[in-house]
Image (cartoon, grey):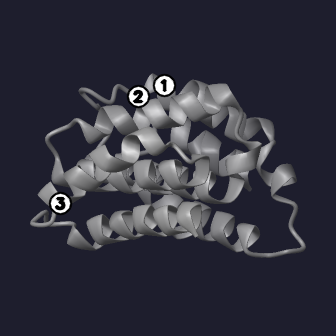
Amino acid sequence: MYRDALSIIRDPEVTDREKEMLIMKNLIPLFYTSANNHSVNMKNVFNSSCFVDYISVFLPSLTPTAPTASTSFIIALLKLNTLLVKYCSTLIDASAKTTLFSFAWNLYRSADDGLISYSLLFLCQFVKEYKVEGLVSRLFLNIIHFYNNAHIDVIYKASGLLSDGRSMTRG
């Protein structure tokens, strides 16, 4: 299923809206359910060549500074990437971490409130999972600036991730 879904995401004949719906209505719920099912070994799910190809080939093929893909499709990708980091953080190699981080970081610097919000959510999940202390203060400062963003619910989730991560390291 994952292999088929990820090949559809890469297909230029499929519209961004169809790709977004595939991610939001099928891929994310399936991945979330797999991650929360203790009988499923996430190493078998994640280490398949399709996820490696998705991270190492597909994500870098998108141009974050001037994306040709629709904003809603890019946001769906950010949501999927956030789940990957949340549930497969120990399975992601250094190169894939760099690719995932760079993808979100470049989008974080965009002018679109939606892209900024979901990039921030991904970055906060990344910081929480990988204990990247050097970014915490910067992300918190940006969260304060984004509290009048149209995507306040996403900003609130992002601040919660950083707050949870801080209390875990101190407590």
| Helix, strand or loop status at disc 3 | helix
Residue found at the far front of this picture: 170
Percent x, y for residue 46? 76, 48
Three-letter amino acid code at the position of disc 3 = Ile
Vertical relation: 91 (above or below) 83: above
Mark 3 highlights which residue?
144
User: Where's the N terminus, which quadrant?
Assistant: bottom right
On the picture, is 146 further left or further right than 34?
A: left
On the picture, is 64 further left or further right than 87?
A: left
The tag earlier along the polypeptide, 2 or 3, is: 2
Question: Dot 1: few (<14), some (14–19), or many (≥20) neighbours within 10 Å?
Answer: some
Q: How far apart are marks 2 and 3 (CA)?
A: 29 Å
Which residue is pictured at 42% across the width and 48% down the height? Answer: 123
- Between 70 and 116, the one lying in front of the other is 116
Residue found at the far left of this picture: 148
Question: Dot 2: few (<14), some (14–19), or many (≥20) neighbours within 10 Å?
Answer: some
Which residue is pictured at 73% across the width and 67% down the height? Answer: 35
Percent x, y for residue 8? 57, 44
